[in-house]
Image: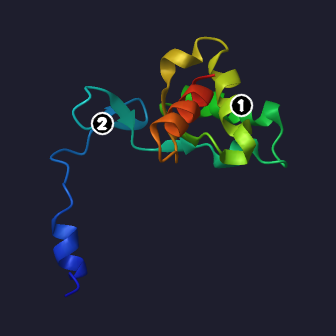
Amino acid sequence: MTESSEAAASRIPRVSTAGTMRGEMLYRDLGSTGVQVSVIGLGGSHLGQAGVTEDEAIRLIHEGLDRGINFLDNSWDYNEGRSEERVGKALSQGGYRQKAFVMTKIDGRTREVATSQIDESLK
């Protein structure tokens, strides 16, 4: 038997408050981590594309962080690693690392592969 959309939606946890406004950005708690992240995040897949220069990618990251976005979403395999490399370069400049909560995805299905992907992402 297939669950109805309404039944599935009723199981999704709902926020009890809209969040906290700081400046023009809305932030919410990230689960029980004690970290507040912007409700708007900056995805990384486009940052390493051939049509985006490294300087443009770094500028986009800096502008997003300067405007209150603090959640950066990436993956070790976006554009053969270029997306993560550009995020790393952007965050290494001018204190930007302290402004960002960085999330990355891995797809390793064994401990060894997952560890290797995490180590590569941390570089």
Q: Identify whether 107 is placed above or below 65.
A: below
Q: Position of residue 32 (x, y in %)?
A: 21, 33
Residue 8 is drawn in which quadrant?
A: bottom left
Give the structural element (helix, strand or loop) at label 2: loop
Q: Position of residue 22 (x, y in %)?
A: 37, 29
Q: CA distance from mark 1 to mark 2?
A: 25 Å
- Which element type, helix, strand or loop, lies under badge 1? helix
The kind of residue on which mark 1 rests is: Arg
In front here: 115 or 43?
115
Regarding residue 46, the answer to whether it shows in the image is yes
What is the three-letter code of the residue carrying label 2? Answer: Leu
Residue named by callout 2: 30
Of residue 16 and residue 120, the one placed in the foreground of this image is 120
Residue 12's quadrant in the figure? bottom left
Q: Residues within 10 Å of mark 2 (few under 14, many from 20)?
A: few
Residue displayed at 84% across by 49% down? 51
| Residue pointed to by mark 1 | 86
**Residue 9 appears left or right of 54:** left
